Amino acid sequence: MAFSLAAHADPILGAGSTFAAPVIHHWSRQYEAARTEGGDYTSPDWRVDYEPVGSLAGIMRLAQPEVDFAATDAPLSAEELHKRGLTQFPIVMGGIVLVANIEGIGGGELRLSGPVIADIYLGKVTKWSDPAIKALNPEVALPDAAIEVLHREDGSGSTLAFTSFLAKASPEWAQKIGAATLVEWPRGKGEKGTGGLANLAAATENSIAYLEYGQVVRLGLPYAALQNHAGAFVQPAAESFQAGLEAFAWDSATGSLGVTTGPTGEKAYPMTVVTYAVVPKDRGMGRIHRVLDLFRLAFRHGGDEASALGYVPVPPALAEKVEAYWTANLGSVNN
């Protein structure tokens, strides 16, 4: 790959989604390796410094003029993009998994539905032996133990995906709590970041938590199969995430795929996530082109890394639409 971008004195600076942090860090190393073209010489401007502070904090960091992009799992509206002079586009996809850390119950053995999960987080279902959970799991030996409810305490796109899923499943949740990156939780213990919540879930017996799929797989945490819109209980996997994402169409006006919870396919996982890069238009074309250069490389050569980490790469057909969107909104990048 040839590069013809002007040199800069500083690395590309990004901040935001903890969901996408592992794959962004991999792409960052890949980008630096590609820029050095196998040589020994490197430069600060060939590095990517990415800070996983959560989707909401990442968007807020864009107010700092040195930040080149934010990564968010909660796409911005067309109105907000226009008002703030921003543009956004998808960079990776995946799913949110319900972890149930119950001794003796392995990954995928427990079944949960949206209404039951909402009642757990509302405090209406407080024990794993509750009849509502037993009805979904007649052959599973559930303990008569209190459910330890865990959640994110920082503004998070994962929280938006999870609360959107609950709001669609439970009118009470929709009315009392709603769906947002940051909500007032009725009960439970909070932790910052995907990694922090994952470690807390691993250390807390009889806990329930919502986490990024790749993190769950890497830590070997036990997860639940979720009931989808068609009534089927679906295991989290790349195939079921992809099936859940296929129903959502690219919107060239906002650079997004819209809301990605509640897909209707029988094989579709019901809680999928798309991470977006958000780029300010006032950073200067040299800086903007470096960000696009990073994600062009990720689209073309970073799919294997994304898949290995438990994500769904942006499909080639969508990547072509995204690159056309760059040309229309930000100018093209040299190949």
Image (cartoon, rainbow, N blue to C red):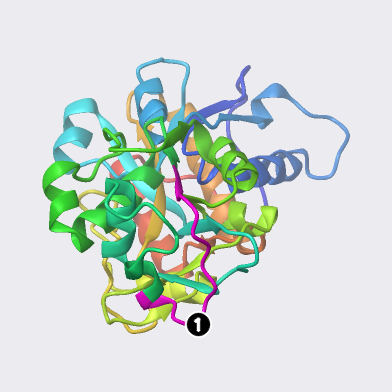
- 214 vs 47: above or below: below
In the image, 157 versus 26, the foreground residue is: 157
Residue at position x 53%, y 39% in the image: 197
Is 65 displayed left or right of 45 in the figure? left
Q: Which residue is mark 1?
A: 139
Q: Position of residue 305 (x, y in %)?
A: 66, 58
> What element does badge 1 sit on?
loop
Amino acid type shown at disc 1 = Glu
Give yes or no for residue 238 being in the magenta stretch. Answer: no
Residue at position x 30%, y 34% in the image: 182
Is 267 displayed left or right of 250 in the figure? right
- 141 vs 76: above or below: below
Q: Position of residue 185 (x, y in %)?
A: 30, 36
* Quadrant of the image occupied by residue 157: top left
* Quadrant of the image occupied by residue 319: bottom left
Give yes or no for residue 147 being in the magenta stretch. Answer: yes
In the image, 322 versus 138, the foreground residue is: 138
- 189 vs 97: above or below: above
Q: Residues within 10 Å of mark 1 (few under 14, many from 20)?
A: few
Residue at position x 48%, y 59% in the image: 97
In the image, 78 versus 37, the foreground residue is: 78
Instruction: Write down the region rendered in magenta.
Output: 135-149
Q: Position of residue 326 (x, y in %)?
A: 36, 47
In the image, 252 versus 227, the foreground residue is: 227
